Amino acid sequence: MQGELTEALTRILRVPAELTVAGRTDAGVHATGQVAHVDVPAEVWAGLSGSLLRRLAGVLPADVRVRSVALAPPDFDARFGALRRWYVYRIADTAWGAEPLRRRDTLAWPRPLDVSAMETASAGLLGEHDFAAFCRRRDGATTVRALEELSLRRDPDGVLEATVSADAFCHSMVRSLIGTLLAVGDGRRPAEWPASLLRRSERANDVTVAPAHGLTLVRVDYPADDQLAARIATTRNLRA
């Protein structure tokens, strides 16, 4: 998505567009709430701001859409200014699987899931921890994260939705968290198992990464405009 949007903006604005996004997602993960910023000359923005949405719709591929554009505050940074990211993972554990029209964003699970056991497991993961066992480590990147929410609910169609929120996520962390909950939900692991992985200092080979297509980035939260600079400074500090 980032590459296609960068190319489209460069073509329309006729200046090099360096796009910064709120969060990078794994290949195959969806985003309905992605946020991005790009710096452009004031005169270019003035000339195109009113028509930019329609112009983007005309050149972007059908599976990429920009739904709004706005002038950002001077201190805005889509990545480092974010307070938290919100993801939703959809799982259909019914006997007939995922509904055909939602098959692209819903995982069809072949066994019934014990939601109560999954909720017990998720409670033990909340808070700030080293999530090394759930992350694919990258050189120089911390695996300490503050998991604020990991909740489960069934929608009116019976699909299980897991909502996950944190200040930030390391590579494959959300899909790994879901993978451990699935193992608990279908009885392959006890409810205490996911939290026990927090004692590990490296990636756990026995954690299965859930398929990408069930995951969607749905929202990114930001502080008030006058607090953006302070938030960016805090985010840039490496947590130990």
Image (spheres, helix red, strand yellow):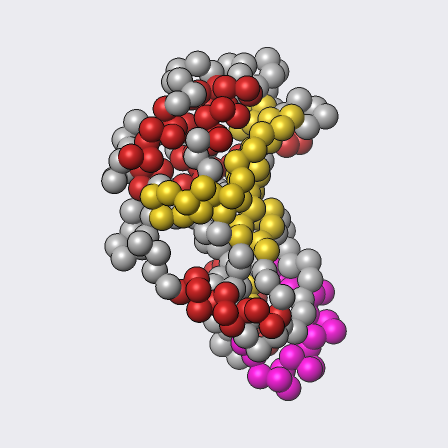
Q: Is residue 240 left or right of residue 39?
A: left
In percent of width and height, residue 92 lies at: 58, 23
Residue 85 shows in this picture:
yes
Residue sitting at x 50%, y 69%: 230
Q: Magenta: predominant secondary structure element? A: helix
Residue sitting at x 51%, y 72%: 229
Asked if residue 65 is positioned above or below residue 111 in the image, the reply reads: below
Is residue 140 shown in magenta?
A: no
In percent of width and height, residue 159 lies at: 63, 25
In percent of width and height, residue 13 lies at: 59, 76
Residue 103 shows in this picture:
no
Asked if residue 162 is positioned above or below residue 191 in the image, the reply reads: below
The C terminus lies in which quarter of the figure?
A: bottom left
In percent of width and height, residue 239 lies at: 35, 56
Q: Report the residue that reaches farthest toward the bottom.
A: 43
Q: Is residue 24 left or right of residue 225?
A: left
Residue sitting at x 26%, y 54%: 139
Which residues make up the magenta segment? 39-60
Residue sitting at x 70%, y 24%: 157
Q: Is residue 34 left or right of residue 193?
A: right
In depth, the one of 223 and 61 nearer the eye is 223
Asked if residue 180 is positioned above or below residue 46 in the image, the reply reads: above
In depth, the one of 82 and 64 nearer the eye is 82
In depth, the one of 12 and 106 nearer the eye is 106
Count of marks overlaid on the render: 0
Determine which quarter of the picture holds residue 236.
bottom left
Determine which quarter of the picture holds residue 11.
bottom right
